[in-house]
Image: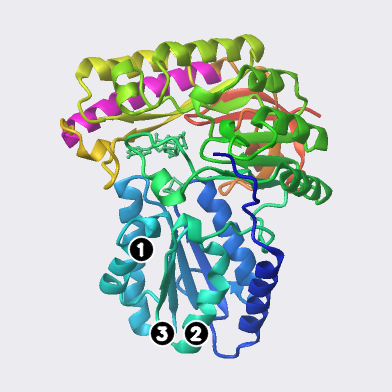
Amino acid sequence: MKRTQAIELPAEEIEHQRAIMREFAALKERPHTYCVVTYGCQMNAHDSEKLEGMLLEMGMVKAQSREEADFVIFNTCCVRENAQRRALGNVVWLKELKKTRPELMVAVCGCMMQQPGMGEQILRQYPFVDVAFGTHNLYRFAQLMLQAVKSRRRVVEVLREEEGSIPEELPVHRSSPYHAYITIMYGCNNFCSYCIVPYVRGRERSRASSRILEEARALKADGVCEIMLLGQNVNSYGLDVEGELSFAQLLAELDKVGIERIRFMTSHPKDISDELIDVMASSSHICHALHLPVQHGNNRILQSMNRRYTREQYLSRVALLRSKVPDISLTTDLIVGYPGETEDEFEDTCSLVREVGYDSAFTFIYSPRVGTRAAEMEGQIPEEVASRRIQKLIAIQKEITHQRYAAYMGQVHHVLVEEASKRDEHQMAGKDEYNITVNFPGTADLIGQIVPVRITSSGESTLRGERIL
Ligand code: SAH
Ligand code: SF4
Ligand code: F3S
């Protein structure tokens, strides 16, 4: 069923939350410095920018280090077991710090909190955590903090999707003046059988295109030269709202705003439309770089994963993309050790990787997530087997990356200069149009500009070159 109502917070609620931020800022006894620790994907990184925006409005300033902060907040991820373990490990580390500094406040939020029973678990097992909340009530952060500080009691609030809302029009502290994230949709409807994201982020909800375009125009006016559109499955943008633009139409409109570079992630292969490929080919500002997670190269496994495309369909999309956008740089996500994966089925992933020729790939060992269908399946793969397979896959991709990068030699790439190298202040680093890091000799005044660089050599995951004057 299509939605006709906006997902954005009503104006009164925004004003209410802003008033709470001012009230918090006026308190004498409250934390004064903060540190935000972020795990997980860009979606979480952008949520952390929203948290920082609110923290600044609440009168706090960023601490010099995590150890010195009066308030530490962990924005967690739970997509794989080790992501969650890492986040919890660091939270426990603060327990010790809190013994020496009892005034220290600790909060936990993000995807991990949305798992069933997590709120109670935090209350029980992590008594040193003062505030905990989930992904659907991020906008109520200031309110929860105020409650905790005033009552001197712990506050845990995790809402279901239908009880929460999207933090629109609240302050955002953007971490870079040159590139910016724009969330275009929240949630995911795909329920890939291994994945927890639909359970912790809720159903697909698209923002109004008018708001997205407004945000892009404001960013352009602020001098931003690269935007990254975010969503778990950006290709299904707009499908949940009556009369909304399609993703391809939205891209075409954004192209007219005139921001030098537009990127987006993540695209689900099943929803890459011909129209989208045409817009990519004809636009002036959409980067010729596409992250197109394939996950696996074997049809039985793809079906069991509920990916809803076959190897052949995926390859035919890639062929069309390459024919219409010949210089396109493709990257992907791959899972090894999915339940029941045989040696031959794993080899299908290896052959697909060779066939496509990705510029790079993120490889993951399958991690069972409670509540997902795959976690209940028979034939869970032993760790040694999965780890041997992933090593092989990594080695194959490394060789392919090397070949792909070799083909870039002599070409001129356009680099958005972001920073001086940590080791050598005369070396500048930034991303080219294909989202590859390029290092070149230069000066700090180039930071924030897009400059032409001739590629001369390559490392394992970076390119090097010389600026063309
Ligand atoms: N929405 C995005 C990806 C979100 S999660 C998409 O569909 O492409 C990022 C990646 O984590 C996925 O692409 C997948 O490769 C990996 N992943 C998700 N769940 C996983 C699990 N249970 N075990 C291992 N890897 C997983
Ligand atoms: Fe997870 Fe699949 Fe949704 Fe991506 S598309 S977030 S892998 S369920
Ligand atoms: Fe992790 Fe949540 Fe992103 S589970 S990958 S932070 S959507």
Q: Main secondary structure of the magenta part?
A: helix
Residue located 67% across and 47% down the image: 180
What span is in magenta?
Answer: 382-405
Task: Please tell me whether mark 3 sits on a helix, a strand or a loop.
Answer: loop
Say above or below: 259 vs 349: below
The answer to whether the residues at label 3 and label 2 have Cβ atoms under 8 Å apart is no
Which residue is the site of mark 1? 90
Regarding residue 67, the answer to whether it shows in the image is yes
Residue 149 image label = 2
Q: Residues within 10 Å of mark 3 (few under 14, many from 20)?
A: few
Q: Is residue 385 magenta?
A: yes
Identify which amino acid the numbered label 2 is placed on: Val
Which residue is the site of mark 3? 153
- Point out residue 233 in the picture as x, y percentages from the top left corner: 53, 35
Say above or below: 328 vs 104: above
Q: Is mark 1 within 8 Å of ligand 3?
A: no
- Point out residue 237 in the picture as x, y percentages from the top left corner: 60, 36
Q: Is residue 466 magenta?
A: no
